[in-house]
Amino acid sequence: MTEEYFSNNDGFLIEHNFTEANQEVMYHTESGFGFVTGANGAKLPLLKIPETNSGFIPKWWYGDNEMIEIQFSGRGCTWNPAPAVLQEDLNGRSIPLCFRQDVPGPGCYRLTLTLWSADDAGEVLVFAGRRRLAWRGEVLAGKEVTVTALCDVSPIIPRGKNQPVFDPNVSFAIICSKGKISLKKARIEKTWAHTVYIMGDSTVTDQTGDYPYAPGASYCGWGQMLGVFLPDGYCASNHAHSGLTTESFRSEGHWNVMKPLIKKGDICLMQFGHNDQKVDFLQADEGYTRRLEQYISEIEAVGAKPVLISPVARNSWNNPQEYNDMLAAYAEAVIRLGRKRNVPVLDLHGYSMEIIRKAGLEGAKRWFYPSDYTHTNDYGAYKMAGFLGKELQAVLGLMTKTLCDWEPKPPLTQLKPPENCQLKPPAGAADNLKVFAAERPEDPITRIECLELISQRMRFFPINVYNDLYDDVLGHETYAGTVQCAAQNHMIPDAFVTDGKLHPHRSMTLLEFVAVLMPAYASRKQLHKSESIPEGIAQYAQEAVKLALGEKIVEYGEDWNALLSRRRAAQLCSAVEI
């Protein structure tokens, strides 16, 4: 691998030739360029931060092992999985070739790659920057393909940090679904472009991907897919981050990073709402709308074009037949504000909800990360970005690209760690169940504990808003948000409420717990139902018991009226696979 530096009017241009071998091909900070192979990504501080690494992170059980082996020839470099990569992890999954080049400073850079394959390589993906899709297509046998993409380089405040981190680099990753592909050349040069700035939350942000990689099993925000639909001369700059609201995008410093970069003629896209609805002072027609309007004014003041986007819909249902739209108020508020300020609105909420309803609870899962009902995978994010590209053409006249559909295909499930793995997994929901079961294990579970436990297991989003639903649950109670969440997801049987009171600290029987657990489970998955139930089951719980028996969560001869211990409640939740 050889590198040549040039100078142009913008001051930076470098070209790498991969047809010649170099003894040192791994990226390290001294050289400022090279491949990220897994092992060096685990050791270098900047590459340990998801927002500043190559965009792909090895599954935790690989530790610091090498993930790829690189070979050079006169046709360029090719790569194979390293010996440490488990064969079972490669079924339907690929190992990306990741390369990183340090650049002198912020701005827009043009990346040009030359690819070649001896055989038909199948579908090839090229990601640039923070795992932003730059190209999707095929490389046929004996054909050379040139891929170009614009890459934004700007500071970012990583998750858990309170100050911007500036790591000026242009990264790219190449993924081949079958056979081998050769990377012959990479050219990186500074250039100029209009910028499409993106503001939002975890449904928009640049998500990292696991490798071994499968599009259906990787978190992805639509902001990292939008660039592939933009016309040449327009560069996407994604400043969305997980957990953000219209308030915290400003208070946590992200607006201060983005605002000085905006120039006349740029476009600023805004999608919030998923986290705003969890905050009492950011209700749709109140703080949420006021803060969006403030952004609009500041963007227009510098001659840029603000564009409002209604929040992408969740795959949320009351049951497999009845969709549960909990973002309607925020979508409607966005549309009203657009009319008021004469600002374009892209109704992503309406579009995404329509296709989710049409596909159904189970069918829509192919667009979402496994066992997640809010965050899309690569397929889903691509579909949402494609809609937004068409809408930008309609409302702003941008000549966006019309690309063929990307149909989801297996695997659509997460990888599982190998048996007898010696490394410790990161903390997760299963650990929460163990902790719950270990604390006062034989105490009867209370109603509020039940609602909290099941909400967490079903991954219903937490909420800090309470609408005075019950006389004995006051807004200042620490569990008021849990009650609101449970009510929004139709988890509370009418039989629990007497004289307007929920009785949150009342101990629960097995029957009562099942009456909460199974309707919540049915909102996440199509369930089997038993034809019969034991005699004497209260009418309000009969359908829940049929589901619990059909799914073999409980046995037919249970003592349904016995108080349920915290340990047993955690065991029942552990049997639920969403």
Image (cartoon, rainbow, N blue to C red):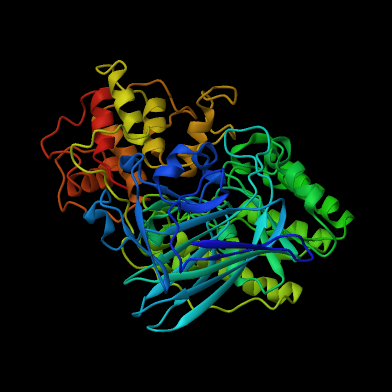
Is 160 situated left or right of 452 in this image?
right
In the displayed structure, 3 sits above or below 74; it is: above
- Name the foreground residue: 75 vs 334: 75
Is 106 situated left or right of 497 in this image?
right
- Name the foreground residue: 97 vs 31: 31
Residue at the outermost left position: 557
Q: Position of residue 1 (x, y in %)?
A: 48, 62
- Name the foreground residue: 290 vs 183: 183
- Name the foreground residue: 147 vs 397: 147
**Could you say which quadrant of the image residue 256 lies in?**
top right
* Residue at screen point 48% across, 50% down: 208
**Could you say which quadrant of the image residue 189 lies in?**
bottom right
In the displayed structure, 159 sits above or below 191; it is: above
Q: Position of residue 3 (x, y in %)?
A: 57, 61
Is 323 situated left or right of 557 in this image?
right
**Tally of numbered tags:** 0
**Could you say which quadrant of the image residue 566 lies in?**
top left
Q: Position of residue 541 (x, y in %)?
A: 28, 41
* Residue at screen point 32% across, 17% down: 439
* Residue at screen point 45% across, 54% down: 25
Q: Position of residue 111 (x, y in %)?
A: 61, 66
In this rendering, does residue 361 appear at all? no
* Residue at screen point 27% across, 29% down: 569
In this rendering, does residue 566 appear at all? yes
